[in-house]
Amino acid sequence: DSGVTQTPKHLITATGQRVTLRCSPRSGDLSVYWYQQSLDQGLQFLIQYYNGEERAKGNILERFSAQQFPDLHSELNLSSLELGDSALYFCASSKRQGGNTEAFFGQGTRLTVV
Amino acid sequence: AQSVAQPEDQVNVAEGNPLTVKCTYSVSGNPYLFWYVQYPNRGLQFLLKYITGDNLVKGSYGFEAEFNKSQTSFHLKKPSALVSDSALYFCAVRDMNNQGGKLIFGQGTELSVKP
């Protein structure tokens, strides 16, 4: 168990809908990263927060947004969902941002858009 | 741009034989390199990292990795493979150009260990 908790584990929803994925980082970790894993794109970095502030953005669609709350948990909001958004979404956390610290991953949320 | 490449989509090994999963990197400056493993329907688990110092890094589950600066490689190795090592393996490099320091992952290598 990595100590990173993601909910829900599975999500099935229709096109056009909006969903929220939740991540609780390991105790004491200030940095949260979101990744999308799909068969054709591999692991793609979406966005990163550090102690409540957005620090880096990757290939995140405008339909997607995220935030990190004062208690350090993070949420990834996906709206106007399309079939192509079906993927495994991972959250990872680390004590610091960057440097030599490894990131610990949650078990992911498998999103299926039908 | 910083990147990692895993040239093999799949590696097949017999149980008890040594295994190598290859990774090459492209970064400016000194790299921070990582290996992760993903079992089916699970998240990525950290195996080991290279920061500086000894070129041979030891990690979890008997895995080790050899950092080679001249060849810009960071290959994952294990002296004797187990069937339970079958999984998807990812090499990653820290993005040193980005304030957030995200990990940049390779495409992954599927390791299959047969009895």
Image (cartoon, coloured by chain):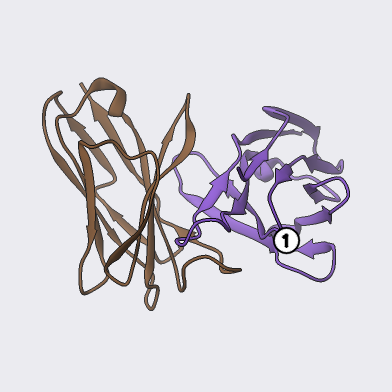
Chain colours: A brown, B purple
Residue depicted at 15% across the width and 36% down the height = A79
Quadrant into which the C terminus of chain B falls: top right
Reply above or below: A13 against A19. Answer: above
Reply above or below: A53 against B13. Answer: below
Protein chain holding label 1: B
Residue A78 figure quarter: top left
Percent across and percent down for residue A45 are 43, 45
Residue depicted at 81% across the width and 55% down the height = B67
Farthest residue, direction bottom: A28
Left-right relation of A71 to B82: left
Residue at label 1?
B30
Q: Amino acid at mark 1?
A: Asn
Residue B3 figure quarter: top right
Residue nearest the observer in this picture, A64 or A28: A64
Residue depicted at 62% across the width and 52% down the height = B93
Percent across and percent down for residue B2 are 62, 45
Percent across and percent down for residue A83 are 25, 21
Q: Mark 1 Cα within 10 Å, few/some/many (few <14, many 20+)?
A: few
Quadrant into which the N terminus of chain B falls: top right
Left-right relation of B11 to B68: left
Q: Could you tell me which secondary element the residue under label 1 belongs to? A: loop
Residue nearest the observer in this picture, B35 or A69: A69
Left-right relation of B86 to A1: right
Left-right relation of A18 to B76: left
Residue depicted at 20% across the width and 74% down the height = A70
The total number of labels drawn is 1
Residue nearest the observer in this picture, A41 or A111: A41
Percent across and percent down for residue B29 are 71, 58
